[in-house]
Amino acid sequence: MPASAPSPVPPPVSGLLSDADKGSIGITLVREALQGARARGHDTDALLRRAGIRPDLLASDRARVSAASYARLWSALADEMDDEFFGMDRHPMRRGSYRLMCHSVLGSTTLEQALQRMLGFLRLVLDDLHATLECRDGRARIVLHEVGDPPRMFARATFFMLVHGLACWLVARRMPLLEAGFAGPEPAAAADYRVRFCEQACFDQPRSWIAFDAAWLARPVRQDEAALRVFLRGAPANLLVRWRDDGSLGARIRRRLRPLAPADWPDLPALAATLHLSVTTVQRRLRDEGQSYQRVRDGLRRDLALQLLGQGEPGLSVAAVGERLGFEETSAFHRAFKKWTGVSPGAYRQALPRVTGSSG
């Protein structure tokens, strides 16, 4: 754990994360992404290295990788397999399919029309999964229908990410999900699913769905061809992290802490005062989200470490990274980072590609 605040000499870490607060991804989802490629005999270690992820991290259940590295892995897998659905359907979603779907919906007048076109396109491309748009009692639901053997949870989530992410981009705003339901038992990566979709995600449901306010269906499509060219540079990998659920109290707290140096992060009573909530209310609401204030701070410090080591100032030493994050001793930073990710800060940095492309 970090020691008390260091001297105020190091500059704050504000601006290191984008407004989307990309964060990090649990190693369980890395394993899930690789499963289809491994089953088909692809060199998954080489794919991991291309993404800047050390293959030995797969053995550490607590390991996490940066969202940028995970997005690079998605792109590498799609290229290697020529399948943007990663071998999770009997019919491959050939590279470029998502681009065609984007073009097919760009001329839509409303989000409802765009969603119907999306779902129609995916029904033509995939054999084992398709979805329908249903409306009732002021709520719209995209309901997944499965053909044949039950798919993996990762396949269900990927389908929804492709649709929901594009919908958000089309209306130029995150469309908050009111609920998400998934068939099948709760996975080890349930927390990551809730971050991506919504805190109200539940499992062991008869069918899988995502639900949102039906008023969104009437919103106009705001994007054009020029914007699409920019969007497609990182798609579909950028959809993993760009349209996360930012409505939880934990996400609100991260946004308040992020512009500050860790040495200036408030204690719980001071934070509660800025939120105009009591300490008890903050603790209860965070507990309902499976969080605590300490866990939020530790998670943000971890993600800032990943960002500084991966995309920080050129020449910034590991010791300097630790100092900026509030560690008085480099050895303490090494221990914490290895606990977070399964490797040392230096090993993590060495694994990163020398030149990285856009990750959305």
Image (cartoon, helix red, strand yellow):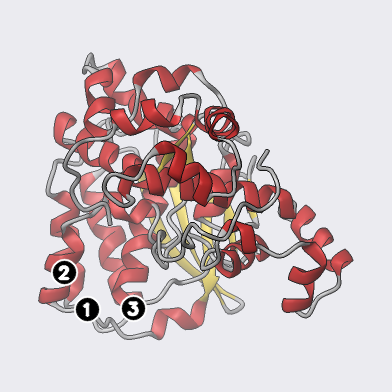
Say which mark, if any, is on residue 262: none
Number of residues whose C-alpha sits closer than 10 Å to that of mark 2, classed few (under 14), some (14–19) or many (20 or more): some
Identify whether 223 is placed above or below 58: below
Identify the residue under disc 2: 228
Q: Is residue 341 visible?
A: yes
Q: Are marks 1 and 2 in contact (CB under 8 Å)?
A: yes
Marks 1 and 2, the one that precedes in the sequence = 1
Q: Residue at x 15, y 50 (%)?
A: 97
The crowding category of the residue bearing disc 1, from other C-alpha atoms within 10 Å (few below 14, some 14 to 19, many at least 20), is: some
Estimate the x, y position of residue 191 in percent, counting from the top left: 60, 44
Residue type at mark 1?
Gln
Left or right of 213 in this view: 347: left
Residue 264, picture quadrant: bottom right
Badge number at residue 171:
3
Q: Say which amino acid is labelled 2.
A: Leu
Whether residue 85 appears in this view of the structure is: no
Of 170 and 262, the residue lying toward us: 262
Task: Name the secondary structure under disc 3.
Answer: helix
Q: Which residue is mark 1?
A: 223
Q: CA distance from mark 1 to mark 2?
A: 7 Å
CA distance separating discs 3 and 2: 12 Å
